[in-house]
Image (spheres, grey):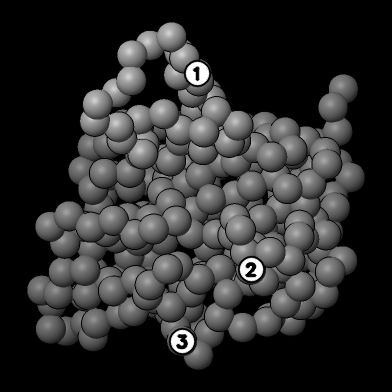
Amino acid sequence: MRTLLAVPLLLAGCAAPESSDNAGAAAGGKTAPGVVGDNAGPGAASGEGPGAGGGCPAAGVRMWFGDTSAAMGLRSSGLILENCGTAPLRVEGYPEITPLDEEMAELDVEVLRGVQEITGALPHLDAPPRPVELDPGDQAAAAVVWRNTYDDTRNLPVTVHCFRAGTRLVTPDSPLDLGSTGRVGVSPWQPVESRPAPAPPDPRAPADPYPSPNRHPDPGRSPEPDPLPLL
């Protein structure tokens, strides 16, 4: 049997939080026997996104936000988790994230399990949670969605600067403007599928009179992950 590691979401972002061994629940999934905790100390997992440098955190997990997309007041971003360690791991359920302001104080924001109340019916995002097993190098993703409408003067506008997950913090590419809505929705974890490497061009084929730099990617490059379809 493969050894499954519990997934402690060891994040960094707004500032270095205090050290703690209680990181397993943040994944929103079940804890497997043989929990591997964070032995790197506070702040050691900063710069966890791809290409950020600094190597893999001691827990073998990297996590970061993707780019934010927007449409008619609706906003979305992908929360990406990567197994950068050497052993398989499993995530299940919904990410457990707590919205914080710029002073790292907890905000009065409701985190919904599911996105339908905010986006309407999007079956590909609101599928029932299921276990996602990640081999080294694999990724899982969850959608985080919100609206920036302000239509209730009884509630002050709310801006989320970062999220706490377990003992660490993760920062989106830009603050989340929630308007007066006071809530965000989170989808279940889903596997991120990698696109197959493209076939090299046939050297016997006639030359393309209008070459495109993206027509024939370098066949030696690693396949890019297929982003989670959000909106």
Residue 82, x across and y down, in percent: 64, 47
52 is higher (above) or lower (below) than 154: above
User: Tag 3's secondary structure?
Assistant: loop
Q: Nearer the viewer, residue 207 or 20?
A: 207
Q: Residue furthest bottom?
A: 103
Label 1: state its secondary structure.
loop
Q: Position of residue 210 (x, y in %)?
A: 24, 30
Q: Amino acid at mark 1?
A: Ala
At horizontal 14% and vertical 74% (from top left) the residue drawn is 150
Disc 2 is placed on an element classified as loop
- Can residue 191 be seen here? The reply is no
Q: Residue 31's x, y, as percent?
A: 75, 45
Marks 1 and 3, how far apart at CA: 47 Å
Residue topped by disc 3:
102
The residue pinned by badge 1 equals 199
* Image vertical order of residue 11 relative to residue 120, above or below: below
